[in-house]
């Protein structure tokens, strides 16, 4: 069971890194927790913010992803966005 959860979490994080809103929407609408984290306590929201995938960030927040979670390195989604020069605000 734990391996299946790890595999699904990896799938969610990979989708977040690619900007794959379809996979994320499918997984979360079927009840997968948007806050599930990998071995470094990184969440899909952190990955999407780091990559600048604004649509994914918005979608994960709609699925109640917690923007205040901290990974094992002390980083949050907002900090990842800032460190990588990405803005998750509205586009002009």
Image (spheres, rainbow, N blue to C red):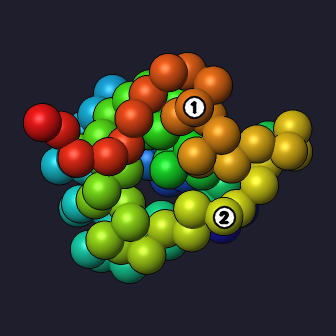
Instruction: Calculate the distance from the C-alpha at mark 2 to the C-alpha at mark 1.
Output: 14 Å
Left or right of 35? Residue 24 is left
The residue drawn where x is 47% and y is 38% is: 49
Question: x, y percentage for residue 21?
Answer: 22, 47
Q: Residue 55 location in percent, x, y?
A: 24, 45
Residue extending furthest front?
Answer: 92
- Quadrant in the picture for residue 91: top left
Q: Is residue 33 above or below residue 12?
A: below
Nearer-the-camera pick, 88 or 28:
88
Q: Which of marks 2 and 1 is nearer the N terminus?
A: 2
The spot of residue 39 in percent (x, y) is 78, 44
Residue sitting farthest toward the left: 92
- Residue 32 drawn at (x, y percent): 43, 70
Observer-nearest of 27 and 90: 90
| Disc 1 target residue | 82
Q: Callout 2: helix, strand or loop?
A: loop
**Residue tagged by mark 2?**
68
- The C terminus is located in which quarter? top left
Within 10 Å of disc 2 (Cα), the crowding (few <14, some 14-19, many 20+) is few
> Residue at 76% across / 42% down in the picture?
75
Asked whether residue 82 appears in the rendered view, the answer is yes
Secondary structure beneath disc 1?
Answer: helix
In the rendered structure, the answer to whether residue 49 lies left or right of residue 57 reads right
Q: In which quarter of the image is the N terminus?
A: bottom right
Res. 14 visible in picture: no
Category of crowding for the residue at label 1, using alpha-carbon neighbours closer than 10 angstroms: few (below 14), some (14–19), many (at least 20): some
* Residue lying at 51% horizontally and 48% vertically, measured from the top left: 44
């Amino acid at each position: 069971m734990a391996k299946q959860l790890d595999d699904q979490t990896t799938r969610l994080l990979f989708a977040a890194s690619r900007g794959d809103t379809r996979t994320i929407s499918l997984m979360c609408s079927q009840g997968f927790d948007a806050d599930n984290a990998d071995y470094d306590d990184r969440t899909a929201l952190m990955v999407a913010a780091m990559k600048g995938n604004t649509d994914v960030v918005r979608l994960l927040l709609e699925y109640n992803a917690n923007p205040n979670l901290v990974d094992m390195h002390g980083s949050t989604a907002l900090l990842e966005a800032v460190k990588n020069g990405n803005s998750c605000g509205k586009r002009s």
